[in-house]
Image: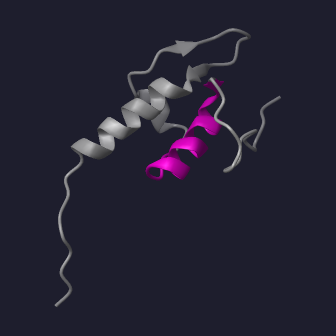
C-alpha cells in the first residue's frame, strides 16, 4: 500500500529519516520546488530497512543547499 500524503508538515520538527515524498516536501518548503522522483537521481545514501527506501534528512538538506548555492543567479529586468 502506497501513501499519497506526507507525514510531515511545515512547523513540525524535521525527522531524522524520511521517504522520498516526505523529503521532497521538506526540501520544497525550505529551498526550492522539487519532485520526489528527482531525489532518485541525487547522490544520496538510501537505506531500505523495511523494503521502503528512506534517506537521511540532514544529508539531503545539505545537498539541496549546495545545489541552490551553485545555481546560476541573475537579475531579471522587465523592459
Q: Position of residue 49 (x, y in %)?
A: 69, 8
Where does residue 43 sit, x and y in percent of width and height?
38, 22
Residue at 53 percent across and 15 percent down: it is 46
Judge whether 59 appears above or below 27 on screen: above
Q: Residue furthest bottom?
A: 79
Number of marks drawn: 0
Q: Residue at left 24%, top 48%?
A: 71
Of helix, strand and loop, which mostly describes the magenta segment? helix
The part of the image, by quadrant, that contains residue 23 is: top right
Q: Along the horizontal axis of the image, is 67 left or right of 28?
A: left
Whether residue 65 sits left or right of residue 45 in the image: it is left
The residue positioned 63% from the left and 11% from the top of the image is 48
Q: In which quarter of the image is residue 26?
A: top right
Q: Residue furthest right?
A: 1
Q: Which of 73 and 42 is in front in this view?
A: 73
Residue 62 versus residue 72 in the image, above or below: above
Residue 69 within the segment the image draws in magenta: no
Whole-percent x, y for residue 7 in the image: 76, 38
Instruction: Determine the image quadrant of residue 24.
Output: top right
Residue beneath the point at 64% across and 27% down: 18
Q: Does the magenta stretch include residue 25?
A: yes
Q: What stretch of residues is rendered in magenta?
A: 17-34
- How far from the left and from the top, in percent, is residue 33? 47, 52
Picture quarter with the C terminus:
bottom left
Q: Quadrant of the N terminus?
A: top right
Q: Which of 43 and 62 is in front in this view?
A: 62
Left or right side of 73 for 1:
right
Amino acid at each position: 500500500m502506497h501513501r499519497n500524503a506526507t507525514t510531515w508538515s511545515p512547523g513540525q520538527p524535521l525527522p531524522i529519516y524520511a521517504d522520498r515524498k516526505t523529503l521532497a516536501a521538506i526540501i520544497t518548503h525550505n529551498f526550492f520546488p522539487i519532485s520526489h522522483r528527482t531525489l532518485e537521481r541525487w547522490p544520496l545514501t538510501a537505506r531500505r530497512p523495511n523494503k521502503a527506501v528512506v534517506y537521511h534528512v540532514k544529508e539531503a538538506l545539505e545537498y539541496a543547499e549546495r545545489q541552490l548555492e551553485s545555481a546560476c543567479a541573475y537579475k531579471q529586468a522587465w523592459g
